[in-house]
Image (tube, rainbow, N blue to C red):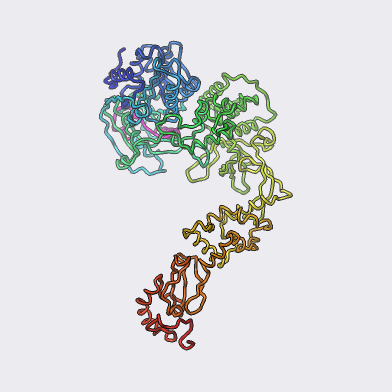
Amino acid sequence: MQFPSLPVQAVLADVVLALSAHHQLVLEAPPGAGKTTVVPLALLDQVWLAGRKIILLQPRRMAARAVAERMAYLLGESIGQQVGYRVRLDSRISSLTRIEVVTEGILTRMLLDDPALDGVGLVIFDEFHERNLESDLGLALCLQGRRLFRDETCPLKILVMSATLNGDRVAALLDQAPVVRCQGLMFPVSLHYGAMQNAGESIIAPVVQTVLHALRQHEGSVLVFLPGQSEILRVQEALEKQLPAEARRQTEVLPLYGSLPLAAQQRAISPCVAGDEAQRKVVLATDIAETSLTIEGISVVVDAGLKRVAEFDPARGMSRLRTRRVSMAASIQRMGRAGRLAAGHCYRLWTENQQQQLLAYDSPEILQADLCALALHLLNWGVSDPAELDWLDPPPSGAFNQALQLLTALGAVTRDLASRPVLTEHGRAMAQWPVHPRLAHMLQCASTMGVLKEASLLAALLIERDPFRMEGADISRRMQRLTGEMPCETAQRAWMSRVQQQAQGYRKNVTVADRKLPVSQDELWALLLAYAYPDRIAKRRPGPQVVYQLSQGNAVSLAEDDPLAASDWLVVADMGGMSGQQDRIFLAAALNPVHFNDYLSAQVRSKELVEWDQQSQRFIAEHQQCIGQLVIHRRKLSVVPLEAKREALITQIRKQGLSSLPWTETLQQWRARVTLLHQSGLPQEGWPDLSDATLLASLDTWLGPYLDQIGSLKALEQLDLQAILAAQLPWPLPQKLEEQAPPTWCVPSGSRIRIDYLQSPPVLAVKLQEMFACVDTPSVLQGRIPLMLHLLSPAQRPLQITQDLAGFWRGSYHEIKKEMKGRYPKHPWPDDPLNAAPTRFTKKRV
């Protein structure tokens, strides 16, 4: 077989040899090396393949189609013969097909249907550096499926191919697989850096000006990398307005993103047709153009340096799209697009210093994605703990457990006798639907209710990008277009065709008798959404602003002029906003609360609530019916159980802290004395721990029995807290407390001075003259802890702080005496304090 001259041909022999000797291989080759199309064809006739298929995994549908068509062309065949593809909504394979190019979700479905992958000899993971969640899952399932179901006589070989990835790390996962590296061939690319790029700044104007400059300065077509469809359409509109008339005739401005119709995608990646007036093109693309997809005629790249990624927000229980800077690896790959055919140019809309600050690689999707679908797939595979599989990066335990919680709420998961998560019968049925588990739950419920036709349309609509956001949030208007009740504009016909085609796919292998539910069409959309998003049932808060509280607790807002703003209850299908700000509702349906009594009754939970309401300063005792954190109905309890009332008080005390109890200075000192003995290293004596943390944690034990007659927080002042805490000291500890940590100390003058145990060490503050003739520093705990003496002036100000009384008399006393004698002449300042009479009086009284 003759291949075009491509760099990967230099290592084809190494690839063939390595896969003949091993069952796994890592191939590193830069963009444009030809690995995607040449390698599968070169392996097609290998003896070890023994007539079995090659599965080539591609991250995107557009690339999968293009790759399959290119390989078929090289074989001189039409698509669907030896080379075919399977993607969502499209398939071109036959009984002759030996190489199947599939997207990642298709591979997962193949593995779940047949863990052994019978009839497959090689699985190729292409563009693995993108680290998509499905590719990580597919590799983990392939490795375990091979280990459990295949043997040496019928091996499943695995080839991981990447342009920018640490191949040695992947090789270690694949049992130290050999690594083949291809140097590639790329023409020189001149780099042009822009101004400092700050987060949040609009990129539209800089991109447009850079593209116009590049068109003036260079020949050939231009590939522009933008984060998403919104930016693509805005740049396209601005370019078509600002291009000079002559350039406008000679230049096509073409968008390229995943939801474009196939014909429009093909137009963007195809070369300019000879004879057309347009001699060059500007392709405005998302990161879809980073992959093995080849775009003809590109000699200039303009890179905005941004990409849009879905990140799971655990606090909101949903994924949101965020705009992030690309990694250094991605920026290099984008740059390479300009040097595939000849020397080219790359314009980066950031500084060279910012380039050095980029992360080396993009964060794997598995570390930041919603793991609900992954958890359902693993449980359907028979794995309850992800640690049973081999991962390059294992799923984070927190996100995985949150996914299990959602699956449990959807009725898909229960626990076995060993407390391991397992699928219910409903969960196994959900796993057969090729959609997110939320929509799978909705479709499965709809099939039992006889409204699958409507639910499949709704599911397909929710998967597709919403083209009607400017019309408001009401999902009913979108559905009216799909059901024919409203006309669909010409510009949205492709959208409607995709949605309807996808909906038909959901019903393809399901036989369910349709029936009419006794609800309006608008009510039906809300009911179906409530099955998919039980945590997003929302109730409007009182007040002038249009704010709703979701059943999971968060608040979301709705535009004041939106027709749905008149609804008390909604089900929210789509929401979002800026980080740190309240989310806005983008798509929702008005919900009739009467259905909490019928179709949604399984989601309603009843509970008795007895708690202290801080705002009204009273107990609330009522029976509530709730959806999540939303109260549907409440009625007062005629009798409040003492146990519940006691628990409510204890909960409020824990919230406010121990300061809500009637502490006195004497009681605080008593607690400090007990604490000193508890910390003294004498645990055998049984001194209790009276720290704040311990007292708060054990409120129900030591305080609960005394709360039955307490009706408010103010009534806590009636408690004899001294007696309650004293009951914590069994006999003879009260007597030992007086002996080892007495509350006062009798000083040489005869005065009894209070010891301050709230300080550490305990403090004895006494007038200096009262300590005359005393050599030994007073101490507690039978002499183990010397008191800290604060020796005071006649004005009760500290003259000396010491734990060495004898040293004080020998030393600094004499300096203090010189200074104080003139200031306080009425008080004794003897030269020999150890032989002077201690006194609390003046010299005259003495």
Q: Is residue 713 above or below residue 461?
A: below
Q: Position of residue 454 (x, y in %)?
A: 61, 26
Q: Position of residue 289 (x, y in %)?
A: 38, 28
Q: Is residue 648 above or below residue 92?
A: below
Is residue 32 on the magenta stretch?
Answer: no
- Give the magenta-colored segment's residue range: 212-239
Q: Position of residue 110 (x, y in %)?
A: 48, 21
Nearer to the camera, 201 or 77: 77
| Magenta span dominant secondary structure | helix
Quadrant for residue 794, please give it. Answer: bottom left
Report the residue that reaches farthest toward the right: 638
Q: How many marks?
A: 0
113 sits left or right of 333 in the view: right
635 sits left or right of 156 in the view: right
Nearer to the camera, 341 or 30: 30
Residue 453 visible in the current orientation:
yes
735 sits left or right of 222 in the view: right
